[in-house]
Amino acid sequence: MTMTRTLGVPGAHLRYEVRGAGPVLLLLGSPMGIAAFAPLADALVGDYTVVTHDPRGIAGSALDDPEQDSTPELRADDVAALLDVVGAGTADVFGSSGGAVTGLALVERHPERVRTLVAHEPPLLELLPDAADRRAMVDDIVETFHREGAEAAWWKFMAGSGLAGDGDGDAPAAAPDEPSPMDLVDGARFFAHELRHTTRYVPGTRALASGPARVVVGIGADSGALETYRTSMALCELLGSLPVEFPGEHVGFLERPEEFADVLRKVLSSPLA
């Protein structure tokens, strides 16, 4: 059975879901929310109490001030509040993409709350040797959104990230799927208030490496051409660790949830992962 509830936090009301039984496992995205993680959550309910939520300002999580920016630090504090409301002193955490950045901020700000963080392909562009160029790319995407709208911005985002096209800023080979009205709202928020803050986050590697939480970097088996492959490997280098390979590409948890869940279980149960 899945329970859907709302939690009031400073400046927002978070929609969250709880399903399953066992140790608490949080699945984090940004801007992806509850809907994107449902297949993976369903695959894990036999082993965990799985908690998912819509990040502040996304889908069912409304903001008091719609113009408030979404930072990794704010989102991390939201996750700590979710742990409180579900009665979990500590939890395992899986974060993908921007959710992985949220997870890294959670480990830094609330290290005692995390047992293991699996940070799957965090887009930490500031760790790259060409960070200045990547920063300019993000600025261009955001400016394109304000000037031409979300569709044009998505084309540039997909090409620049390597998810489509050649990764050098050319248009992707195919346009993104036809967006729903909610997709349009969430996309606008992502470009206007979230993308810059997420990609410019710089993790404190000393805190990550020496704190009580175990940090594991996840990478898609088919993600070699993606920008997030580069950022994940850069984070591994800073942490002095090797990545764990997961099925699929950047959203392998959507494409192959059962296989993805199998790998995640192994990572969480292995003290040497």
Image (tube, helix red, strand yellow):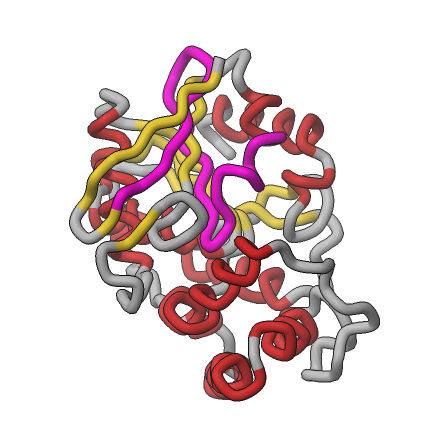
Judge whether residue 3 is colored magenta: no
User: Height in image: 64 above or below 128?
Assistant: above
Judge whether residue 118 can be spotted in this image. no
| Magenta-colored span | 13-39
Outermost residue to the right: 173
Q: Is residue 261 left or right of residue 147?
A: right
100 and 69: which one is in front? 69
Q: Residue at x 33, y 31 (%)?
A: 115
Outermost residue to the front: 181
Q: Is residue 245 left or right of residue 190?
A: right
User: Height in image: 137 above or below 52?
Assistant: below
**Image quadrant where residue 5 sits:** top left
**Image quadrant where residue 39 sits:** top right
Q: Position of residue 179 (x, y in %)?
A: 65, 58
20 and 94: which one is in front? 20
Judge whether residue 38 can be spotted in this image. yes
Q: Position of residue 224 (x, y in %)?
A: 72, 60
Outermost residue to the left: 10
113 and 211: which one is in front? 113
**Image quadrant where residue 117 sits:** top left
